[in-house]
Amino acid sequence: MSRILPSQHTLIWRTVLLNILLTLVYLSTAKLGLLFAFVQGNATLIWMPTGISLASVLLGGYALLPGVALGAFLTVATTAVPLWVAFAVSVGNTLEAFLGAFLLRHVAQFDISLQRLRDVWNLFLWAALLSTVASATIGVGSLCAAGAVSWTQFSQVWLIWWLGNVMGNLLVAPLLLVWSRSPCWRLSQLLEFVMMLVTTCAVTIIAFGGWIPPTHVEPYPLVFVVFPLLIWAALRFEQYGTTAANFVLAGFSVWMTVSGSGPFAPFGLQGSIELLWVFMAVTTLPALLLAASVSERRHAEEALQHAYSQIYQIINNAPGVAIQGYDSEGRVLFWNKASEDLYGFTEQQAVGKRLGQFLLSEQDAKEFEQMVQRIVQTGQPAPLREWETKTASGAPRHIISSLFPVRIERDKVQVVCMDVDITERKRLEAELLRAQRLDSIGRLAGGIAHDFNNLLTAIMSYAEIALTRLPEGHPAAEDIQRVLDAADRASELVKHLLAFARRQTLTPQVIDLNHLLHNVMPLLNRLLGKQVELRVHTDPALKKVKADPTQIEQTILNLAINARDAMPNGGVLTIETANVTLDTTAVQAVPDMSPGEYVMLSVSDTGTGISPEHIEHLFEPFFTTKGDQGTGLGLAVVYGVVKQSGGHITVESEPGRGTTFRIYLPSVPPDTTA
Ligand code: ADP
Ligand code: MG
């Protein structure tokens, strides 16, 4: 409480002081106004206190109404009329200020900066035209009732009173409201403003001063020369300029006309009042409206500029979506950050160029430009289209792009292109398709092999029985032996097929791959011959895996033999082991693989490599490029064994450079024994 009370006190004191100040200002401007009053009545063409009151209440709130009341009371009380008339006039003027402020605030949602056309209209309608009726009616009515003015003159005096107050609210109130916030101008603007104001003063004085030319009997009608000055004020300084110029213009024109000079003076009291008022009406209001429309237009442009720059920021920083703009000929207009990241070409390198010059093949670029032209002509977006291209570093990319028109001016269209990199998705799709295909081939081959194996067992056992029943040296014995040999080879084939189909019986053990490698080294060296150098890098801390050692040996041998076949003129075969931990992103590249701890065994060669079309079919049974020399079962068996052991196999190959197969087997915890 103790902290709130002083501030309440200061607030009250402030209000009291402001009220006193307002009373004094009211009184002095009223007296000053009366000095310029037209002879008859107390009427002046611009009743400044009205504008001061309205502006004060709009700026400082209804708490300033007492100041208005007291000011109005003292103004009249110091003249010859009875006190009750002063009281009535005070009521009328206070009501006027209250009504004006109330209507503007609550009916018109008025903004004191007058930067919108509607605010100018509302000021004119509610404050200038309407609220002033109250004070004119009550004021003149009470003057008549007191006998200070005769009832026959009521309408004439009422009109002058009312018009004075109208001009007060149209000239003085805007001046105070607008200038209650100081403008932030540069020095040059300030100088121009002063120049504009001085010119307006001079021109008004010339037009109303009756200075030129003395040879003419009638005053020279020069009042229209003020219009360019009002336009200057509105265009360059908006409300600040207009309110100031309006005030200067009205002030001087009234003063000069009252003192008997200028083009309106010769028309007598009534005539000059009418002409002057019409003159002020056609300058003040249009000037305020002009300034407001200049402001509105400026605001609209600023908002547009703001929106543009926001959109530009968003486009430029949109992550992952490469966005470019193209002109109707397909030349790059803009190139956002994501485009730089995706293609490796900077904005400077891209802007102004055709895509054929750096990104697309000539054929694709032509098609792209045709698409752009069609979009510009029809105004319709193009259907999604996939492109294959290479980045600045030569990496192949698969892109899906959407092209659509953006109208930037009435008849100017740009084409915007949004690209999404689907290289990885494409690769995964192919990978998945391959895995699925291998799976279904496996199921088919496995089913056949299984049944065939049973038949073979029957064939072989009957053939053996037949062989034992034949007497020694029987000529058919040799034929049956051939049957048995063929059945043996058939059974070998079936075994491979079953291995591929993951249907062979495995006897998994916890094994150390380094140890196993060590055991097959002599055999490997013999198989590879002198032409091929064998390098083995083993991880000494290698974890153990659970697998069938015979089958893993077979796997290594199959891979090594293929590597040897791929290096007919010699080369290097590298076998490596390592512990690897694969996280979620790492396993995304391989279908079915889950994150975790693996032991990796890689077999790389420096041979011919494998073409992309062949990689597609690599693990399929009977796929071979070796004609009669190959069976096409080596990799099929490898695949089946690895899969059946819960592992994964990947292949990476660059034609002419060599091939790397990597086998990942889940590692087992260190203390596992069986
Ligand atoms: P085969 O060796 O009987 O042809 P595989 O299943 O072992 O059958 O291999 C299938 C095919 O894969 C081979 O014919 C060969 O074209 C290709 N291939 C396998 N390994 C390699 C390698 N290391 N380098 C080049 N091509 C390979
Ligand atoms: Mg092979």
Image (spheres, helix red, strand yellow):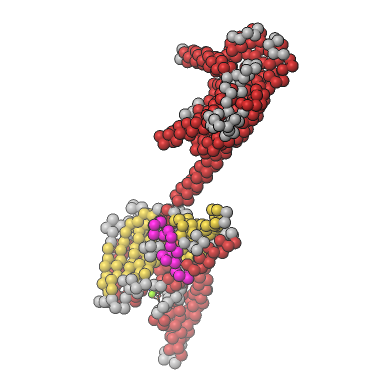
| In magenta stretch: residue 356 | yes
Q: Is residue 542 above or below residue 173?
A: below
Q: Is residue 168 left or right of residue 493?
A: right
Q: Residue at x 28, y 71 (%)?
A: 572
Q: Is residue 456 visible?
A: yes
**Extreme residue in the right direction:** 152
Q: Quadrant of the C terminus?
A: bottom left
**Extreme residue in the front direction:** 215
Q: Residue at x 43, y 85 (%)?
A: 481
Percent x, y for residue 170? Answer: 60, 27
Percent x, y for residue 473? Answer: 41, 91
> What range is drawn magenta here?
347-364
| In magenta stretch: residue 614 | no
Percent x, y for residue 634? Answer: 40, 73
Q: Is residue 276 above or below residue 563?
A: above
Q: Is residue 382 visible?
A: no
Percent x, y for residue 5? Answer: 48, 13
Examine the image and state in which quarter residue 222 appears.
Answer: top right
Instruction: Tell which quarter ligand 2 is in.
Output: bottom left
Report the front residue among 669 and 568: 568
Report the front residue among 153 and 357: 153
